Amino acid sequence: MSNHFIQKLKGFGPLADEDIVALENVTKSARKVAARTDLIREGDRPGPLFVVLDGWAQRYKILPNGTRQIVAFLLPGDACDLHVGTLAEMDHSIQTVKAARIATIANGVLDDLMDRHRNIRRAMYRAQLTDEGTLRAWIVSMGRRTSIERVAHLMCELYLRASRIGLIDGEGFELPLSQIMLADALGMTPVHINRVLKDLRSRAAMEIRRGTMVIQDPVMLAQIAGFDENYLHRRLRQIA
Amino acid sequence: MSNHFIQKLKGFGPLADEDIVALENVTKSARKVAARTDLIREGDRPGPLFVVLDGWAQRYKILPNGTRQIVAFLLPGDACDLHVGTLAEMDHSIQTVKAARIATIANGVLDDLMDRHRNIRRAMYRAQLTDEGTLRAWIVSMGRRTSIERVAHLMCELYLRASRIGLIDGEGFELPLSQIMLADALGMTPVHINRVLKDLRSRAAMEIRRGTMVIQDPVMLAQIAGFDENYLHRRLRQIA
DNA sequence: CGGTCCGTTGAGTTTAATCAAGAAACGTGG
DNA sequence: CCACGTTTCTTGATTAAACTCAACGGACCG
């Protein structure tokens, strides 16, 4: 059975057999978690590191006025903050989006893993860096893109991330996000998301059909989005 | 002469004398850089790690339509991405805001430093985590806060960060940001920023006077912002 | 088969952007 | 140290984008 986490780390630097064994060991405790279940809540004392082996999760924050902002989507292979456990209090919550398989790595175990395996350490930092790039891209989207550009940009991002971990099947990929979630991720209202999706559909750029995202015209979509995939660090530099 | 970088890292975990010596060594190459100078540009092959010892810098991205989005402010003691040098291409630019003193740490030197000094490594990761928290807070602001809340929130953030590194002098602190920069950071137009600042001034919450930010009513400002300083991880958990 | 959540559409409102123009501050060179 | 040019700040009037409110159809679930 393939382990998306190991798969992903391999993309960020060479791993020796012993590294892989260590990673398998440390993630074999994975458990099934139902959809819409909080793994950890804002204000909690940070627990272990979470690794999404299968399924989707999201980071989000609820504001005093009751609105919600989703801050990141976690796809198979994604981990939460490295060393999140060293800080006093969570500043946001993490929740499964659909049924997921989640591994938890205790802090001590993680420290140990990072101390002993230089390859793993480096691969995880690089993974961390691409996550940061994604956060920055979200800020750019929210600050300077129109609503249709924003939607298109998120779709490009998710498509690219899904494709890298082999989640594309022919016509499209599974997108387990309601329009409400999209609204909370993009800083809009569900009503407006609905209108934007209608617009994208009428332009024959993309369409969401029963939980499946279908990109009819990838070039048009990327053009609308002003999408620059460099921020996801597609090409790693050759490292000595 | 105090070194803001070392000062800041000390706040994220204990450093031994030898750690401090190593950090001093590695930052003694600092050079003066004029205001509004790009340290590195989007598309460049990432160079060394930059550390801001004094002055302000900013990360920003220019969009195809010519607009700009500032993605982060770097204050004295702040560093750029760890291991930024391991990736293929910068996805944004970094520029000084005012005249600054910048140290550069070559990739090999940084790797070496991190490998040899466990304390430094950990402190830098924790610093990195708080930076990430700040990015998430910006996303929340842009997505779900009104313009006045957004401005107030940024001011609270900057005030808190400035106060931690001893940049507050009595009434306020130096804020070397034009309204244009504030607009580019908050995803608004300069005209609207101007009106919002006027509003905050008329409420006697805060005021910017000749490059100095004066907070007349911190409680009101934090209330307007819905500011939760936890995201900046004020309190580090006790670590064994 | 009834309830709830989600998606869809229309009408009216609010927020912030745009356009425009003048005043103030700043920097530079003579 | 002043004069001039440039950038930044400020304000008003108008426009555009997205939100709010409301209602209904459809899908899914127990």
Image (cartoon, coloured by chain):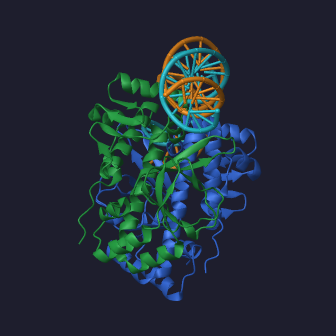
Chain colours: A blue, B green, C cyan, D orange
Residue A106 seen from this side: no
Q: In which quarter of the view is residue B19 placed?
A: bottom left
Vertical arrangement, residue A226 with respect to residue A117, above or below: above
Vertical arrangement, residue B55 with respect to residue A68, above or below: below
User: How many circles with numbers are drawn on the protein?
Assistant: 0
Give the camera-side residue of B45 and B211.
Answer: B211
Q: Position of residue A58 (x, y in %)?
A: 47, 55
Give the camera-side residue of A51 and B168.
Answer: B168
Q: Is residue A81 left or right of residue C16?
A: left
Vertical arrangement, residue D18 with respect to residue A116, above or below: above
Residue visible at 67% across and 54% down in the picture:
A228
Q: In which quarter of the view is residue B170 placed?
A: top left
Q: Position of residue A8 (x, y in %)?
A: 56, 71
Q: Is residue A62 left or right of residue D1?
A: left
Residue A225 seen from this side: yes
Q: Position of residue A192 (x, y in %)?
A: 58, 34
Quarter of the image where the C terminus of chain A is located: bottom right
Give the camera-side residue of B221 and A104.
Answer: B221
Q: Position of residue A153 (x, y in %)?
A: 63, 48
Q: Is residue B52 left or right of residue B60?
A: left
Q: In which quarter of the view is residue A107 placed?
A: bottom left
